[in-house]
Amino acid sequence: MGEKNQPHDAARQRLDKWLFFARMAKSRSVAQAYIQSGKVAVNGSSVRQSSHMVKVGDKLELSFERMDRTLVVKASGERRGPYEEAKLLYDDLTPPREPSDLMTPLEQAMREPGSGRPTKKERRALDRFISDSGEGFE
C-alpha cells in the first residue's frame, strides 16, 4: 500500500529539479528563485513556474550574474551527481567568451601606479617630507 503507482514520464522533469541535477543551481530553492525572477526561458518564452516540465530537446536560456548560458536538454536527471555526470544532461550552446572579457589573476592583481594605498617606501618618503617641512600634522 505504501507504493505509489502513478505513471511517471521519465522524459519530462520539473525545471527546478533539472537545474539542480545539472548543477546550474546550488539547491532547488536557489533554482526556484532563478525561475521566479524571470532569469530562465524555455524554448524562447520566459517561465516563472518552477513546476514547468522540461523534456529532451528543450532549449533553456539562463541569465546568471556573470554569464548567460544557452543549453539544450539531452536527458532528465536521476540525482545530483558529480560534474562529469551532470554535463551529460545537456549540450552547452553558449558562445565562447571574448578573450578581452577574460582577465588573468595577474591582471586582476595589478593596479595603476598611484592608485590605492601607498607602499612602505612611499609612506616613508611622505613622512620625511612632512617632518622636513616643519608643519606639525600631529
Image (cartoon, rainbow, N blue to C red):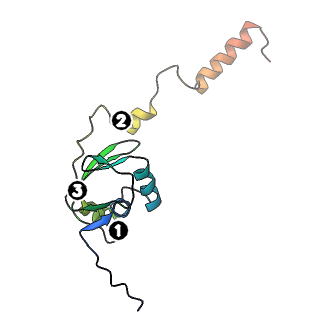
Q: Which mark is residue 103?
A: 2
In the shown orientation, is residue 33 left or right of residue 84?
A: right
Task: Please identify the quarter of the rendering in which residue 20 is found.
Answer: bottom left
Q: Name the amino acid, label 2.
A: Met
Which labelled disc corresponds to residue 55?
A: none
Determine which residue is flagged by label 3: 58
Give the mark, 1 or 2, whose residue is nearer the N terminus.
1
Of label 1 and label 3, which has the lower sequence position?
A: 3
Disc 2 on helix, strand or loop? loop
* Residue 28 locus on image (x, y percent): 43, 61
Quick one: 53 or 129, which is closer to the camera?
A: 53
Q: Nearer the viewer, residue 77 or 134?
A: 77
Secondary structure, mark 3, is loop
Q: Relative to residue 115, is residue 132 drawn left or right?
A: right
The residue carrying mark 1 is: 81
Mark-to-mark CA distance, 1 and 2: 30 Å
Tell me which numbered mark, 3 or 2, is placed earlier along the sequence.
Answer: 3
132 shown above or below 124: above
Q: What amino acid is at disc 3? A: Asp
Single out the mark in the foreground, 3 or 2.
3
Between the residue at mark 1 and the residue at mark 3, the CA separation in whole angstroms equals 21 Å
- In which quadrant is the C terminus drawn? top right
Give above or below for 15 relative to 38. Answer: below
Which one is in front in this view, the residue at disc 1 or the one at disc 3? 3
What is the distance, in whole Å, between disc 3 and disc 2 at their CAs? 33 Å
Measured as percent of width and height from the top left, residue 50 is found at 39, 58
Q: Residues within 10 Å of mark 3 (few under 14, many from 20)?
A: some
| In front: label 1 or label 2 | 1
Give me the residue at 27% from left, 34% from top. Answer: 99
Q: Quadrant of the N terminus?
A: bottom left
Taking depth in this image into account, of 80 and 57 the one nearest to the observer is 57
